[in-house]
Amino acid sequence: MKPVPFRYVRADSLEEVLDALSEHGDEAKVLAGGQSLGPLLNLRLATPAVLVDINRVPELGGAPRDEGVAVTVPAMTRQRDAERSAVLATRCPMVTQALPFVAHSTIRNRGTVGGSLAHADPAAELPTVATALDAEFTARSTRGVRVIPAADFFRSFFTSELAEDEVLVSVRFPARTSGEGTAWVEFAPRHGDFAIVGVAAKVGLDGSGVVTAARLVYSGVAETPYRATEAEEALVGQAPTPEAMVAAGAAAAAACRPPADLLGSSEYRQNLIQLLTARALQSAAESARRSE
Ligand SMILES: Cc1cc2nc3c(=O)[nH]c(=O)nc-3n(C[C@H](O)[C@H](O)[C@H](O)COP(=O)(O)OP(=O)(O)OC[C@H]3O[C@@H](n4cnc5c(N)ncnc54)[C@H](O)[C@@H]3O)c2cc1C
């Protein structure tokens, strides 16, 4: 199948992007890396009248920027460049831990960080990581600038908080603090496939090794990245023992009602939540001990 005919607008500045989106509204679609939009166009699941190509917009590109307490990643940063960024590896290691699981390197060469987030696929790695790290999204339109917390950004399956005339400009990931460790663990049929379940775990330890803060966010189990708040709260004040981690996994699985699909039943996903949570917590706790 081929896409329906569309008008192609190659924007050379952010102003041109905003003007095109303002003029065409829900008739327009932004084209970033095209790794999700391309297949949707070919299958005619997306039928925009206008495609606004943002690949040559200088204001949307560039390398991740170290701001000390956070790293700002321009929307058009290729996933592969983010994966290789020393700034992200040092300041926001969860991003670096998760990116190798996003598709294959050839897809990451074109796919962008902003495209993955704007696409809002609940099975994707980056939306889950952004939620776990309390990232902030900067969106622009001719109406102005908005900063949207990750907790409010993902609305439903493939639906973000971005309005039709808004473009995602950048995402800001808070930097890891001392005593904090992170991990990304997932289970997929084959490496590079979308995971059936993925877990982003963040653990803060005090000087005596007791958990001061925990964050557990899952991909593939709900219509947006799913946060297991009860399991997080149960971990705080405890030593991160294998028993505590297994109990956290059980609590997270019990609180969640994942959807069933061809890849697995709801119960199968709950089993994965339980298993992967313990693994992710162990890895995050080890990384927290190293960062003290
Ligand atoms: C075979 C295959 C396997 C894949 N496996 C995985 C996987 O395991 N995990 C995973 O996370 N992803 C996977 N992907 C998707 C891949 O990561 C895409 O790169 C990503 O989802 C979209 O990024 P993109 O830059 O290609 O965006 P595009 O495809 O260009 O755009 C995607 C959507 O986001 C919108 N958009 C893009 N950028 C912006 C912006 N700056 N502002 C506003 N809207 C914007 C577009 O209008 C479109 O609706 C896979 C893709 C393929 C083809």
Image (tube, rainbow, N blue to C red):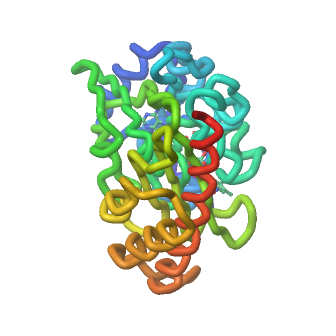
* Left or right side of 145 for 52: right
- Quadrant housing residue 281: bottom right
Please say whether residue 116 is visible from this viewpoint.
Answer: yes
For the point 46% across and 20% down, the residue is: 69
Q: Position of residue 136 (x, y in %)?
A: 37, 32
For the image, the number of numbered tags is: 0
Please say whether residue 117 is visible from this viewpoint.
Answer: no
For the point 34% across and 20% down, the residue is: 19
Whether residue 245 is situated above or below residue 92 in the rendered picture: below
Q: Quadrant of the C terminus?
A: top right
- Quadrant housing residue 196: bottom right
Outermost residue, right side: 106
Q: Position of residue 227 (x, y in %)?
A: 36, 58
Q: Position of residue 41 (x, y in %)?
A: 54, 52
Closest to the observer, 60 or 186? 186
Q: Quadrant of the N terminus?
A: bottom right
Whether residue 272 is situated above or below residue 244 in the rendered picture: below
Closest to the observer, 272 or 150? 272
* Left or right side of 105 for 77: left
For the point 38% across and 39% down, the residue is: 134
- Quadrant housing residue 263: bottom right
For the point 37% across and 54% down, the residue is: 236
Closest to the observer, 243 or 167? 243
Whether residue 30 is situated above or below residue 147 in the rendered picture: below
Closest to the observer, 238 or 119? 238
Q: Position of residue 173 (x, y in %)?
A: 47, 31
Outermost residue, left side: 143
